[in-house]
Image (cartoon, rainbow, N blue to C red):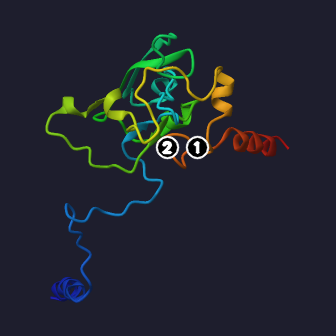
Amino acid sequence: MSGFAKGFGVTFSHMFKPKVTVDYPEEPSKLQPRFHGRHVLNRHPDGLEKCIGCELCAWACPADAIYVEGAENTEAERFSPGERYAKTYQINYARCIFCGLCIEACPTRSLTMSNEYELARDDRRDLIFTKEELLAPLIEGMEQPPHPMRLGASEKAYYDSGPVNPGASEGAEFSLTEMLAQNRRGEQ
């Protein structure tokens, strides 16, 4: 009998507490700013892609969920400011474990994670996101690649002349001067 009383006691104690139910589709949950959701391939302020097709993210992925195929830029068709760009980029979200190791491996801060978490699909093949689905949208002042570099004639000038928080990944990266200052502080 005392077991029933304890069980009903728990039930009755919760009956008068405020409800914590979330009206999900109409009111999405508020996430923390550093939540690891869907990946985003960022762009430079003129619209060129930051991804240089180095494939380091694919090598770092423990779940083997990323496939990258790099290609060479030409003066006639330039997709990124460097020598190479990602011709093919795919992330298989049926395999991805959202660990963030790919983000850490990216040398150009091209790959970041957004707060988007609604990735459910009816078909497993729809969970393979392509480069077109992952690329950050063009914002005002950006031009659809391929086009020549707009921020400088050389790669060094291109990276030195950019704004503090370039492209669509605002707040996810530092300016070159800030990074150099941090490196100097770390060496001392």
Q: Quadrant of residue 125?
A: top left
Q: Could you classify mark 1 by the number of other residues whose Cα lies within 10 Å: few (under 14), some (14-19), or many (20 or more)?
A: some
Asked whether the residues under the numbered discs 2 and 1 touch, taking CB atoms below 8 Å apart as contact, a structural biologist would say yes
Q: Secondary structure at mark 1?
A: loop
Q: Could you classify mark 2 by the number of other residues whose Cα lies within 10 Å: few (under 14), some (14-19), or many (20 or more)?
A: many
Q: Which residue is more in the foreground, 141 or 53? A: 141
Left or right of residue 1, residue 50 in this image = right
Q: Which mark is residue 169?
A: 2
Q: Is the C terminus in the top left, top right, bottom left or bottom right quadrant?
A: top right
Q: Quadrant of residue 161?
A: top right
Q: Name the residue that disc number 1 marks.
A: 173
Left or right of residue 83, residue 168 in this image = left
Q: Quadrant of residue 144?
A: top left
Task: Give how far across and how far down residue 26 sits, in percent.
Answer: 20, 64
Q: Is the N terminus in the top left, top right, bottom left or bottom right quadrant?
A: bottom left
* Amino acid type, residue under disc 1 in the picture: Glu
Task: Give how far across and how far down residue 48 sits, in percent.
Answer: 48, 28
